[in-house]
Structure formats: structure tokens, C-alpha cells
């Protein structure tokens, strides 16, 4: 890696698992006991907004009880000490990268600490519980605030920035993501077609493992610090 290189990192639920945040695809196919289409799709929200608010209120509240782990902290160290560019993209809606010290994070699937008004489209920071009786501070419409989470069938955030970073990447690393959900699952292909070396860090084989040049198998808290040491070792 030269000083001018670009490293692109994609993280998924597996990086936060050892902090105690549940991953999405449990063996029963449910997310914390709910069908994904009920709590992570616009149709589910239209059918039962109270259930969806309650679901995300619990997740938002739960963030207070979890801490960033060694993998989040290692990526913050990489962003701080690597002389080239480090683009950190996460599918996670938690704030553990930021609390682990990362200064710049692309939340392609949104954030638990933000809400969006479906009437005036304004996005606001949000720390407390949300429900369907609340009014938007901007346009004063009642019942139009929703979690600023990208649900199934919706377009992820910052795709132009992400695609441009992938095309200049010398190294692409996917950490703790199952490769089930597109477009993120296709990033390895874009990076590879642009000439990047690709590395997967996961504690199990995934749907897309075969597409990577190298695999590091094991818990993120062990593998990511090792990988970061290696990425920083040739920095001078
Ligand atoms: N260390 C490394 N990898 C781990 C660990 C760990 N400690 N624990 C779990 N994993 C891996 C699992 O093997 C799995 O491949 O993390 C992955 C988690 O996969 P998912 O639960 O499917 O999460 P993710 O890939 O982030 O999901 C993508 O799907 O539901 C949507 O929008 C939601 O952002 C989410 C997207």
C-alpha cells in the first residue's frame, strides 16, 4: 500500500456482534422475533407504524447499553494513522464506529439516531423514543416522522460516493457481513473489476466468500486489529 492508496472498508452486523448487538439473519430467519418484512419494509410501516416505532425505539434505547469493541477501535486507528484515504462504509445503523473513534463513516442503511419526515423530507438527530402521534418540528405534520433507516425496496444512501471510492480502491475489505443484501453484496465485484485486492473477514463462510482474494476467518475483534496492523505496517 502506498501513501496515496485508497482503502475501502465495508462493515456489517458481525462487527457489532461482540459488542452485544444482534445480527440480522438468525437461524430462524427472524430479526429479534419479527419477520423482516414487518419491521424493515415501507409496507410493514404503513400497515403497523406503532409496531415499527416500538421495534426501533428498543434498538435505539439498546445502544446505551453497548460499547464499541476492538474491531471498531482498530478501524478508527486505521483512519487516523493511514497516510492515504480510508473510506469506511457501514450497513449498520448503530453508532459504534463513531463511538470507537471513527471520524468519517458512511451509513448506507441509515442511522438509529436520526429520523426523517416523510412530508418535508428533513432529517434530524433523534435520541429518544418516537411514535406516530408526534409532529415534525419543521413542517408540523403529525405522524410523518419515521426512523431514518433504509428499508427493503429503498435506495441506500451515498451510492455515488461509494461507487466512486470502490473504483479507486487498491484494497477492499468486507467485515462481518453475510453478502445476502444488495447492493452491498456486489461491492466486492466492483472493487475487483477496478483492480483492488479484496479481503473478507468473517467468522463463517458467506454467500460471497468465493469472490474474495483472501479470507480471514475468526471473530472480528481478533482479525480486524491484525489486519489493521498489517495495513499500517508498510505506511512509511
Ligand atoms: N466476527 C466476524 N463475523 C461475524 C461475527 C463476529 N464476531 N458474528 C457474526 N459474524 C458474521 C456472520 O457470519 C454473518 O456473515 O456477520 C454476518 C452478519 O450477517 P447479517 O446478520 O446478514 O448482517 P449484514 O450482512 O450486516 O446484513 C446486511 O441486511 O437486514 C438487512 O439492512 C439490514 O444492514 C442489514 C443488511
Image (cartoon, rainbow, N blue to C red):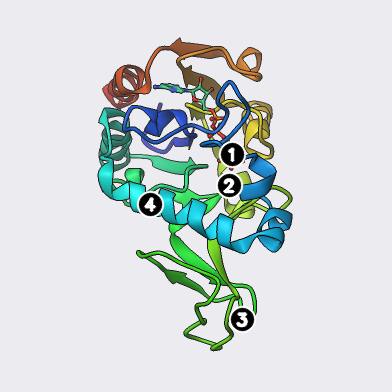
* SS at badge 4: loop
First in residue order: circle 3 vs circle 2:
3
Of residues 127 and 14, the one drawn nearer to the viewer in this rendering: 127
* Quadrant for the N terminus in the image: top left
* Residue indicated by mark 4: 104
Q: In which quarter of the image is the C terminus?
A: top left
Instruction: Using the rendered image of the protein, determine whether residue 100 is visible from the camera's viewpoint.
Output: no
| Residue sitting nearer the eye, 184 or 110 | 110
Give the image location of residue 123, x and y in percent: 51, 71
Task: Tell me if residue 180 comes above or below residue 99 in the rendering.
Answer: above
Q: Residues within 10 Å of mark 4 (few under 14, many from 20)?
A: some
Where in the figure is residue 50, as x and y percent of width and height?
57, 62
Q: Which of marks 4 and 3 is in front?
A: 3
Q: List the residue tagged with mark 3.
A: 120
Residue tagged by mark 1?
166
Look at 52% across and 42% down and name the residue there: 91
Which label's residue is closer to the chain start, 4 or 1?
Answer: 4
Distance between the alpha carbons at the discs numbered 2 and 4: 13 Å
Residue 80 location, quadrant: top left
Amino acid at each position: 500500500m502506498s501513501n496515496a492508496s485508497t482503502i475501502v472498508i465495508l462493515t456489517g452486523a458481525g462487527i457489532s456482534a461482540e459488542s452485544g448487538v444482534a445480527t440480522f439473519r438468525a437461524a430462524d430467519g427472524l430479526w429479534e422475533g419479527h419477520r423482516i418484512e414487518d419491521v424493515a419494509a415501507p409496507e410493514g410501516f404503513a400497515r403497523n407504524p406503532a409496531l415499527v416505532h416500538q421495534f426501533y425505539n428498543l434498538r435505539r434505547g439498546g445502544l446505551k447499553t453497548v460499547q464499541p469493541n476492538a474491531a471498531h477501535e482498530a478501524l478508527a486507528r486505521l483512519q487516523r494513522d493511514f497516510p492515504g484515504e480510508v473510506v469506511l462504509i457501514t450497513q449498520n445503523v448503530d453508532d459504534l464506529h463513531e463511538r470507537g473513534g471513527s471520524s468519517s463513516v458512511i451509513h448506507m442503511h441509515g442511522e438509529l439516531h436520526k429520523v426523517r419526515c416523510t412530508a418535508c423530507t428533513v432529517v434530524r438527530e433523534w435520541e429518544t423514543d418516537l411514535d406516530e402521534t408526534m409532529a415534525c418540528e419543521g413542517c408540523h405534520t403529525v405522524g410523518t416522522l419515521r426512523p431514518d433507516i433504509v428499508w427493503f425496496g429503498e435506495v441506500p444512501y451515498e451510492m455515488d460516493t461509494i461507487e466512486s471510492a470502490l473504483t479507486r480502491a487498491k484494497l477492499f475489505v468486507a467485515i462481518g457481513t453475510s453478502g445476502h443484501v444488495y447492493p452491498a453484496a456486489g461491492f466486492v465485484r466492483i472493487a475487483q473489476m477496478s483492480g483492488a485486492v479484496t479481503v473478507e473477514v468473517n467468522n463463517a463462510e458467506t454467500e460471497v466468500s468465493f469472490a474474495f482474494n483472501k479470507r480471514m476467518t475468526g471473530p472480528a475483534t481478533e482479525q480486524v486489529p491484525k489486519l489493521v496492523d498489517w495495513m499500517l505496517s508498510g505506511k512509511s
